[in-house]
Image: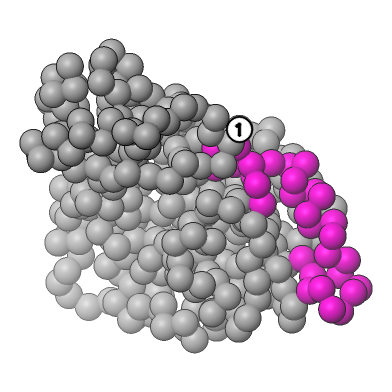
Amino acid sequence: MFFASDNWAGAHPNIVAGLSANAGGFSTAYGDGALDQAVYQRFNEIFEREVAVFFVATGTAANSLALTAYNKPGGISFAHRESHVIEDECGAPSYFSGGSRLHEIDGALGKVDPHNLERTIGRFAPEIVHWGRPMAVSITQSTEVGTVYGLHEIETISAIAKQHSVPLHMDGARFANALVALDTTPAEMTWKRGVDILSFGGTKNGCWCAEAIVLFDLDRAKELAFLRKRAAQLFSKSRFVAAQFEAYFKDGLWLDTARHANAMAARLAAAIEDSATAKLAWLPQANEVFAVIKKAEAERLQAAGAAFYDWHRPHGFDGHISGDELLYRFVTSFATTAEDVDRFGLMLA
């Protein structure tokens, strides 16, 4: 009963087979091999236009380099106060950009509030040298608390970014989970809504080590190539990342794994709703479930083999948590089974 993180799950068997199939022989290095080129073209097809694709090792690298691609002296990137770039990346975006800043934006349940964004970004007039100037806006899809931006919400935030002449970055560590939750296309959820650059995650959804920066603003591609090299993220044997993405996309595997993870989250949420000892904090929209549980009960469940974490109360959550309760996060993955969810439900019951 592993609900601690989708990072705990292993690699999907098809991904493993793809790596094995491409392990032998010789291939041009540094992203110029035939398999690399085929995968770049596959990204073009998925996003319905030409894009520039840069493989990297981690989501932190993808986010940091994506923001650095738009770096400027005194630059400020705006993101939700509980976003991964602000809370969980040890200052990497500032480090890679050579000192740009991250500015927190409030919003309920993990999503940037457009009114707060407009008010805050408007405080930094780019001609005032003392304050710093807007550099980028970043949103997370799906968010750190399992909510999903609707297409209109993305478009609204993009319009604010464009009004201030800055790009919109999307942290898509759980991109596929959000995509299937909205039942839309990659193009509709990104560049057609004004997204300029995307951190495309595969690791949480069945890959071993496969992340990519997808750049819709092709004018930035040459510069980003140098930024990636300087950040030590250019793989010599990049075919092993390409092999993962080839298998990931084949026959829609990436969408199937995301649908499964989301379905397991919904199943888990239903079990929590039916329980007398736990309550849902809010309805899940992707593959993260949050519940309020008595601390003693959570400890009993963990001792019985269920892995999950306590979580901080997110901005905008107005549910009641008593002194003997905590908020807990549960994450499902491609490897979560219905049997594990049902077993956990029986333990709750």
Instruction: Estimate the x, y position of residue 291 in percent, counting from the top left.
Output: 35, 30
Answer whether residue 291 is visible to the viewer in this image.
Answer: no
30 sits left or right of 221 in the view? left
36 or 317, which lies in front?
317
As drawn, the residue found furthest toward the front would be: 323
Q: Identify the image quadrant of the N terminus.
A: top left
Which residue occupies 32% across, 33% down?
324
Q: Quadrant of residue 219?
A: bottom right
Which residue occupies 34% across, 61% down?
210
Instruction: Estimate the x, y position of residue 320 in percent, counting from the top left.
Output: 46, 27
Q: Amino acid at mark 1?
A: Gly
**Is 118 covered by the magenta stretch?**
yes
206 sits left or right of 344 in the view? right
210 sits left or right of 75 in the view? left
331 or 329, which lies in front?
329
Element class at badge 1: loop
Which residue occupies 17% across, 16% down?
349
Report the magenta residues as a range. Answer: 105-134
As drawn, the residue found furthest toward the right would be: 127
50 or 302, which lies in front?
302
Q: Quadrant of residue 132?
A: bottom right
25 sits left or right of 83 in the view? left
Which residue occupies 90% across, 74% down?
128
**Is 178 covered by the magenta stretch?**
no
Q: What residue does disc 1 label?
A: 150
Instruction: Estimate the x, y position of residue 102 in percent, counting from the top left.
Output: 63, 66
Instruction: Estimate the x, y position of residue 177 in percent, counting from the top left.
Output: 41, 38
